[in-house]
Image (tube, rainbow, N blue to C red):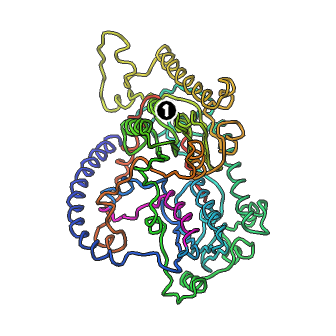
């Protein structure tokens, strides 16, 4: 079995290289063919006209902000050219639509959305603000999940297909515990950590979730779910949070007929998708075929957001999204962010900054470098606020903690103040392969840690002291930034994750509000509230690949790539774990979904 595994993995690597070569050839051919199509299709692009409807598609992935990495070359070969929507574009479009006289209504087209609760809540809050304009909001879905329904519940009217279902199940997550897997391949991990709740190491060394890890998730999810239920109940008159729970757990609404969603008061009426245009025809006073729907990106293109790089009264919004990985520019890389922060600190036109954090953490070293650069920014007398997205935990909280003010969405996951070291030991794998590592060195320290021999108690003690120092540095930074005693921070640290509502109560967060509020706070603090403009960093410059039109036409021209061999996927995942920085400030791996 092991021999087959290795041979399959090697063949997968060869296959991957061949795929890259073929991808390059295919991309060149596609680019040549599509440039002409771009010119032909430019005349049919959507436009904002009188009595237009803003159509927000709650379908597919929603990312924090537009990125040059949002479409990669392999996506073309695989026929997957759907560019993910960006939260900042959606929110900016809803704000513009509220004030734009040509936009008369909002349509929430509910599909299969992939977004965390905080992202969905930010969209929902923007929809609530849009409604203050007096313009109607309608939502429709063939099927509605908890996530899409949470946003749709803010609409004036909710429609669903008579053959569809309201799949409302609550909050959930799944963690993969891989000790048995690593045992089979002969890899073991030795752990040094600080924090009872610092459970990010558990999937590699345990078969089950520990009681502290489960307890913190129970509390976290319970608080988040109460917020979501309350939001739905506040928008759907006559529905209480208790009734929502009863519909889920007692009446099993997810498996009930569509009529149950109407009789329960969660949906207004049942119609087929083809009838949606007729509803908007009544709103606009037009024939159904004349109703003009525009997307958020089209609307925002009229009033570009975050492009005021030459403004003399500039508020910089710096995005720190993803895991903190040293040397990986597609993640949060200190080698990329530190020069930007330094440049913004030294630029006289930049009067303040909002750091938008959406990260579960990562490299402790990278976190420290970014934190020091932010200290330099503040030393220039410029206000710094943090706006937290879905996650701002562990290393994500490290870089946030010394801001002048911290804003978080009520459904943000934050905290996780703790550090761990995860040291792999390949001696079992080497033995299975018939490899006998022989070490020669001038001192025992020359080959410590070496990865082919387990560490002894003294060596483990050395690494534990190393991690302890990092933890004290982390706690000290939080204490300084939050103006708390070290003892007070340690009482709420221990690697525990918190929902933002609890984090505000214990002092880790200042205010429950979104990015827009954080920007306004910085502008007021910098005394430029009446004349500020926004510049977003890192600068987004779309590449040629992202200019390709997406759609069925291209997908028909491109053959679907074969699904990757499972062994190759496994090897790639294992390699990612093994090449990480040895000391991590990373939260427990939790992907929260609104099922």
In the rendered image, the vertical position of residue 21 relative to residue 203, given as above or below: below
**Quarter of the view holding residue 511:** top right
Element type at mark 1: loop
How packed mark 1 is, by other alpha carbons closer than 10 Å (few <14, some 14-19, many 20 or more), is few
Task: Locate residue 177, reporting x and y percent.
Answer: 53, 42
Q: Is residue 531 left or right of residue 436?
A: right
81 falls in the magenta region: yes
Helix, strand or loop for the magenta stretch, by majority: helix
Q: Is residue 263 left or right of residue 326?
A: right
Which residue in the protein does label 1 denote?
Answer: 380
In the rendered image, the vertical position of residue 592 relative to residue 448, given as above or below: below
In depth, the one of 82 and 44 nearer the eye is 44
In depth, the one of 69 and 257 nearer the eye is 69
Q: Residue at x 59, y 47 (%)?
A: 518
In the rendered image, the vertical position of residue 32 relative to residue 228, given as above or below: below
101 falls in the magenta region: no
Q: Residue furthest bottom?
A: 287
Asked if residue 256 can be seen in this view, the reply is: yes
Q: Is residue 48 left or right of residue 563?
A: right
Asked if residue 206 can be seen in this view, the reply is: no
Which image quadrant: the N terminus?
top left
Task: Locate residue 119, reporting x and y percent.
Answer: 56, 55
Q: Residue at x 28, y 60 (%)?
A: 544
Q: Residue at x 67, y 28 (%)?
A: 484
Total labels: the figure holds 1
Q: Residue at x 63, y 74 (%)?
A: 135
Which image quadrant: the C terminus?
bottom right
Task: Locate residue 579, reporting x and y percent.
Answer: 38, 34
Looking at the rendering, the stretch of residues picked out in magenta corresponds to 76-100
């Amino acid at each position: 079995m092991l021999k087959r595994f290795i041979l399959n993995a090697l063949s997968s690597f060869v296959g991957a290289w061949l795929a890259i070569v073929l991808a390059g050839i295919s991309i060149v051919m596609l680019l040549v063919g599509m440039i002409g199509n771009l010119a032909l299709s430019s005349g049919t692009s959507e436009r904002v006209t009188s009595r237009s409807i803003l159509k927000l598609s709650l379908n597919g992935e929603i990312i924090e902000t537009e990125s040059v990495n949002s479409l990669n070359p392999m996506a073309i070969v695989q026929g997957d050219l759907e560019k993910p929507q960006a939260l900042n574009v959606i929110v900016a479009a809803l704000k513009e639509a509220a004030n734009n006289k040509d936009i008369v209504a909002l349509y929430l087209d509910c599909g299969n959305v992939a977004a965390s609760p905080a992202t969905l809540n930010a969209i929902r809050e923007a929809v609530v603000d849009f409604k203050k304009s007096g313009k109607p909001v309608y939502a429709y879905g063939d099927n509605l999940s908890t996530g899409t329904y949470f946003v749709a519940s803010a609409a004036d009217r909710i429609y669903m297909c008579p053959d569809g279902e309201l799949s409302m199940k609550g909050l959930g997550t799944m963690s993969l515990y891989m000790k048995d897997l690593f045992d089979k391949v002969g890899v073991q991990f030795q752990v040094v950590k600080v924090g009872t709740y610092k459970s990010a190491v558990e999937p590699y060394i345990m078969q089950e979730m520990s009681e502290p890890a489960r307890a913190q998730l129970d509390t976290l999810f319970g608080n988040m779910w109460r917020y979501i239920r309350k939001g739905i109940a506040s928008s759907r008159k006559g529905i209480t949070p208790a009734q929502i729970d009863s519909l889920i757990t007692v009446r099993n609404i997810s498996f009930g007929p569509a009529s149950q969603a109407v009789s329960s008061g969660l949906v207004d009426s049942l119609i087929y998708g083809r009838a949606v245009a007729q509803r908007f025809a009544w709103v606009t006073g037009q024939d159904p075929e004349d109703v003009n729907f525009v997307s958020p990106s089209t609307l925002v293109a009229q009033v570009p957001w975050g492009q005021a790089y030459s403004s003399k009264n500039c508020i910089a919004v710096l995005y720190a999204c993803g895991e903190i990985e040293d040397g990986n520019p597609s993640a949060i890389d200190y080698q990329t962010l530190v020069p930007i922060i330094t440049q913004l600190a030294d630029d006289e036109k930049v009067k303040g900054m909002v750091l938008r954090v959406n990260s579960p953490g990562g490299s402790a070293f990278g976190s420290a470098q970014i934190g020091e650069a932010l200290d330099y920014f503040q030393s220039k007398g410029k206000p710094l606020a943090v706006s937290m997205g879905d996650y701002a935990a562990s290393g994500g909280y490290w870089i946030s903690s010394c801001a002048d003010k911290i804003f978080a969405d009520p459904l943000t996951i934050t905290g996780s103040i703790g550090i761990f070291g995860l040291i792999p030991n390949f001696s079992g794998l080497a033995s299975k392969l018939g490899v006998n590592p022989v070490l020669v060195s001038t001192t025992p320290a020359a080959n410590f840690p070496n990865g082919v021999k387990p560490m002894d108690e003294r060596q483990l003690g050395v690494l534990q002291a190393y991690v302890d120092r990092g933890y004290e540095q982390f706690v000290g930074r939080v204490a300084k930034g939050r103006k708390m005693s070290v003892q007070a921070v340690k009482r709420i640290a221990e690697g525990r994750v918190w929902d933002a509502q609890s984090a505000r109560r214990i002092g880790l967060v200042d205010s429950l509000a979104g990015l827009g509020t954080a920007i306004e706070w910085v502008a007021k603090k910098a005394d430029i509230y009446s004349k500020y403009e926004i510049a977003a960093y890192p600068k987004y410059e779309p590449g040629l690949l992202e200019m390709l039109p997406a759609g069925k036409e291209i997908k028909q021209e491109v053959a679907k790539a074969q699904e990757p061999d499972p062994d190759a996927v496994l090897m790639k995942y294992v390699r990612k774990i093994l090449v990480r920085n040895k000391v991590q400030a990373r939260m427990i791996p939790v992907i929260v979904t609104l099922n």
